[in-house]
Image (tube, grey):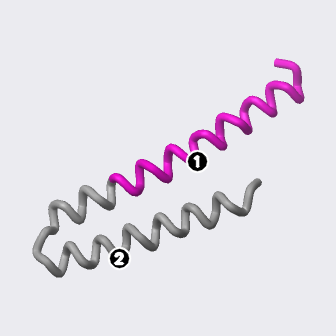
């Protein structure tokens, strides 16, 4: 597993957290929620690609 992916996920989390705090303080709770959900979707897509690669490796290993 790439350690770079962990750093990318952490960076996205930090950026979304800061953006969420700024937007919440500005009274834009709805936009803060949407940005949090967008960050979550981005991270889930990154993880889904890795899970797909894992399943492909398992299929290749067991010749399924």
Residue under numbered circle 1: 47
User: Residue 5 appears at what percent x and percent y?
Assistant: 64, 58
Residue under numbered circle 2: 18
Residue drawn at the location 68% of the way across and 61% of the way down: 4
Mark 1 vs mark 2: in front: 2
Residue that lies at the very extreme toward the left in this rendered image: 27
**Which of the 4 quarters of the picture holds residue 8?**
bottom right
Residue 45 lies, with reference to residue 14, above or below; the image says above
User: Residue 20 appears at what percent x and percent y?
Assistant: 29, 71
Which element carries disc 2, helix, strand or loop? helix
Residue drawn at the location 49% of the way across and 53% of the way down: 43
Question: Which one is nearer the viewer's eye here, 60 or 11?
Answer: 11
User: Residue 42 appears at what percent x and percent y?
Assistant: 45, 50
Measured Cα–Cα span from mark 1 to mark 2: 22 Å
> Total marks drawn?
2
**Which of the 4 quarters of the picture holds residue 3?**
bottom right
Residue drawn at the location 75% of the way across and 29% of the way down: 56
Q: Main secondary structure of the magenta part?
A: helix
Q: Is residue 46 magenta?
A: yes
User: Residue 57 appears at what percent x and percent y?
Assistant: 80, 33
- Quadrant holding the N terminus: bottom right
Indicate left or right for 26 with 9 as reference: left
Q: Which residues are magenta?
A: 38-64
Residue drawn at the location 61% of the way across and 39% of the way down: 49
Residue 38 lies, with reference to residue 59, above or below; the image says below
**Of callouts 1 and 2, which one flags the residue occurring earlier in the amino acid sequence?**
2
Neighbour class for label 2 at 10 Å: few (<14), some, many (≥20)?
few
Indicate left or right for 5 with 20 as reference: right
């Amino acid at each position: 597993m790439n350690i770079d992916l962990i750093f990318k996920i952490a960076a996205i989390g930090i950026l979304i957290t800061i953006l969420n705090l700024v937007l919440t303080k500005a009274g834009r709770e709805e936009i803060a929620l949407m940005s949090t959900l967008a960050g979550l979707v981005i991270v889930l897509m990154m993880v889904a690609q890795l899970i797909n690669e894992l399943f492909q490796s398992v299929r290749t290993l067991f010749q399924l």
